[in-house]
Image (cartoon, helix red, strand yellow):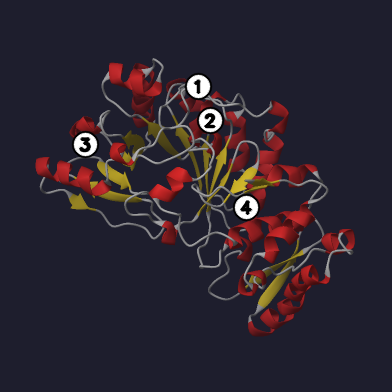
Amino acid sequence: MALHGGRSCSFLWLRQAQALPQGVLKRFPWGTPSRMQSSYSGVPQEEKRLELATADRTNVAAKTPVQELATPGGGRRLLKEDPLPFSAFLTDSFGRRHSYLRISLTEKCNLRCQYCMPEEGVKLTPRSQLLSTEEIVSLARLFVQEGVDKIRLTGGEPLIRPDVVNIIAELRKLEGLKTIAVTTNGMNLARLLPSLKEAGLNLINISLDSLVPAKFEFIVRRKGFHKVMEGIDKAIELGYNPVKVNCVVMRGLNEDELLDFVSLTEDKPLEVRFIEYMPFDGNKWNFKKMVSYQEMLDRIRQEWPGLEQLPAGGTDTAKTYKVPGFRGRVGFITSMSEHFCGSCNRLRITADGNLKVCLFGNVEVSLRDCLRSGAGEEELLQIIGAAVGRKKRQHAGMFNISQMKNRPMILIGG
């Protein structure tokens, strides 16, 4: 379910903020934007309780040393001098700080992976309703100003967007952005990677679900296995370390290749990431097709009993292991059997400009409509902050997710 801008984004903020706990609402330093107050002076009295957030700002200031910074839109941003300066707008009600933004550049793809796209395809959003390059960079700049330090470009297939190199070059100019990553199917990677690296690309994830060419073609419904392998080799040649290889494991299709994938890490600086099969619209998810993390781990340990688990960062999605003596490593994305919602620091923007605070959630907010209605920085941040504040503690569980209406993966952004 998407919430769209309509007359003004201010109304979106009002609708969302009504559902927020008061403790979350009070975190917003600007309270209700003046533009909103003037445009919606006729709203019911109960909605005007949002103005209490503005009054509470005085109480916060009395307790916490702050500085004020003027923003280009004429607003003021509070710069806390306490040990927790991260943006209130990107911090949810459970204290999770969202410093990682995934932006989908396109809904189009040159493959038709079974777990990502329905066999009959998807209805694509008209081009005029997709984010422009300027809009992508503007939103990215706003998120980076608030504390995002990693942006991943996804799709669809991001490398089929003609201006992808230019987008990366523009993102690289953003002060405070440490990491620019891309998730790609690898079909165009060998050709584009030199330019992508020069533009500022730091990290690469390449999708590869089989090492058997015929099986690869069956899973992705297209030819191109050797192009993907060329892309992996080119990434290694250009010094990316590790090169992450994403493999969605599906029973009856490729679970018999687990050991072959692990063997790839013996001599190459790869991190092969085994991903549990997840339910999305149109991918015919079935619990019996899902191979759990524990089952995969047990199978690998039968071959390599000395498999060692590596230390994990606080917001890592992968449980990472290494075979002693191997150059690379393997990881497991355990979204279904052992979720990592408690440490989630990720937000997503779809190619048509909707903000998703959870991959498996079906509530979205249109930042595109906000931009095109002339919303300023303050107003956008109120919308973003309200959406982040409503993020749930964890997803609904794989069986409930499989029954929920959500986008196909290709329309979300991998």
Check disc 3 and report the residue beneath it. Answer: 262
Dot 4 lies on which element?
helix
Q: Mark 1 vs mark 2: which is more N-terminal?
A: 1
Whether 202 is drawn above or below 380: the answer is above
Tell me what residue is drawn at x 78 percent, y 71 percent: 46
Tell me what residue is drawn at x 70 percent, y 40 percent: 135
> Is residue 72 or residue 354 the one in the foreground?
354
What mark, if any, has residue 5 been given in the picture? none
Q: CA distance from mark 4 to mark 2?
A: 20 Å
Q: CA distance from mark 3 to mark 1?
A: 33 Å
Disc nearest the viewer among 3 and 1 = 1
Check disc 1 and report the residue beneath it. Answer: 120
> Is residue 102 or residue 322 the one in the foreground?
102
Which amino acid lies under the numbered mark 1 shown in the image of this protein?
Answer: Glu
Image spot of residue 349 (x, y percent) = 59, 44
User: Do the residues bearing badges 3 and 2 touch, measured as CB atoms within 8 Å?
Assistant: no
What mark, if any, has residue 158 been given in the picture? 2
Check disc 4 and report the residue beneath it. Answer: 143
Which amino acid lies under the numbered mark 3 shown in the image of this protein?
Answer: Val
Q: CA distance from mark 3 to mark 4?
A: 37 Å
Disc 3 crowd, CA 10 A, few/some/many (<14, 14-19, 20+)? many
Q: Mark 4 vs mark 2: which is more N-terminal?
A: 4
Dot 3 lies on which element?
helix
Dot 1 lies on which element?
loop
Image spot of residue 370 (x, y percent) = 75, 47
